[in-house]
Image: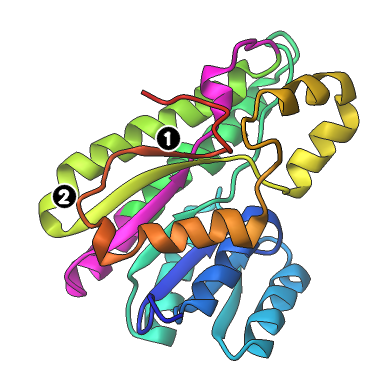
Amino acid sequence: MAQLLDKVALITGAGQGVGQGIAFAMASAGAKVVVTGRTLEKLEKTVAEIESRGGRALALTCDVKSADDLAAIVDKTVSSFGGLDILVNNAQEVPLGKLEEVSDEAFLAGFISGPLASHRLMKLARPHMLARGGGTIFNFVSSAMIRWDMATFGAYGAVKAATQVLTRAAAAEWGRDGIRVLNIAPHAESPGLKWWIENNAQEAQAFFKTIPLGRIGRLEEDIGQAVVALCAPEMGYLTGATIPLDGGQAYFA
């Protein structure tokens, strides 16, 4: 499988969970992958696994709340691998809790690490994608935006809704440049979801019953491979959309 041969991908939050699964899938498809996150040890394990499969990868520490860090990882990606074709904005701090419980600091951290970081990275990536004739950007949203019960998910849903709007705007403004921008809304076996299940057992049981396929998505096989497929030339007419990789649980208009 070499759908992404000669492509360069930059993935935030790739030391574990969804980001790591996407990194594995993209590297297996032939891409040179830059994995970023706050913990070098986790990133190095991701790189070691990719290299053990015969792929090429680079680990870079980054706090997505830092504009300087974001500029540095884009510059290092381009200097190391010669360009940038795919950007995956996966990293995100999650402000959960009832509205009266979510602090200003937590809410702002959600916005800075989510839509603002995605906005910054999209702008940093754009000139390099233009130099390659186009590219694909993936931003991450959530069914928390449209839950049947928004209690305790208001701040998180608001942050993700802002990201969804930015994606639509970027798709509209950059489409003629050959840059496609998509939202991914996954249900996946990530550490974050596992924590939520362990701490909300009754709600989690009800949640599983709403997934038509009856299971949570696998990180590499379900989420990662789907993102790889969305990079293919055959998907070149798809942009500005929200793709729910959630087993059929949510509906996005």
Mark 2 is on which residue type?
Answer: Gly
Q: In this view, does 58 lie above or below 203?
A: below
Residue 145 in the figure: left or right of residue 168: right
Could you classify mark 2 by the number of other residues whose Cα lies within 10 Å: few (under 14), some (14-19), or many (20 or more)? some
Does the image show residue 202? yes
The CA span between labels 2 and 1 is 18 Å
Q: Is residue 142 magenta?
A: yes
Q: Mark 2 points at which residue?
A: 175
Q: From the top left corner, tell me how far across and down residue 232 is, in percent.
A: 32, 65
Q: From the top left corner, tell me how far across and down residue 175 is, in percent.
A: 16, 50
Image point (65%, 19%), residue name? 153
Image point (36%, 55%), residue name? 137
Q: In this view, does 187 lie above or below 73?
A: above
Helix or strand or loop: what does disc 1 sit on? helix
How many numbered marks, from 0 up?
2
Q: Does the magenta stretch include residue 101?
A: no
Q: Earlier in the sequence, mark 2 or mark 1?
A: 1
Q: In this view, does 147 lie above or below 109?
A: above
Q: Name the residue under label 1.
A: 163
User: In the image, which disc is placed on residue 125?
Assistant: none
Range drawn in magenta: 123-151
Image point (18%, 40%), residue name? 172
Image quadrant where residue 38 sits: bottom right
Considering every residue shown, the one lying at the far front of the view is: 213
